[in-house]
Amino acid sequence: MTLQITVNGEPRSVDDHATLADLVAALGQPPQALATAVNGDFVPRAAREGVQLREGDAVFTFQPITGG
């Protein structure tokens, strides 16, 4: 079974047991190179494995900004 979500505004299907960490891995970019948010809420890298994706979730990935 699959879920329908959006990633950066684009529709995407994922496994119904997928976590945010699974999605980031499937995107093919190094996990440390992306910051993530689900439904507008920032998700720290260490917490991605515990975030179960749900039908209709809106996921955004972006380059983290560092500096002072």
Image: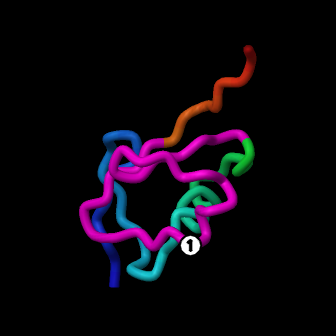
Q: Amino acid at mark 1?
A: Gly
**Residue at 39% across, 40% down:** 8
Foreground: 15 or 60? Answer: 60
Coordinates of residue 13 in the picture (x, y in percent): 36, 65
Q: Which residue, as the protein is rendered here, is positioned at the far front? A: 68
Could you say which quadrant of the image residue 66 lies in?
top right
Could you say which quadrant of the image residue 60 lies in?
top left
Residue range highlighted in magenta: 33-60
Residue 53 in the magenta stretch? The answer is: yes
Foreground: 24 or 44? Answer: 44
Q: Which residue, as the protein is rendered here, is positioned at the far left? A: 56
* Quarter the C terminus occupies: top right
Residue 66 in the magenta stretch? The answer is: no
**Residue at 56% across, 72% down:** 50
Coordinates of residue 32 in the picture (x, y in percent): 74, 46
Coordinates of residue 27 in the picture (x, y in percent): 58, 53
Could you say which quadrant of the image residue 25 lies in?
bottom right
**Residue at 53% across, 46% down:** 36
* Quarter the N terminus occupies: bottom left
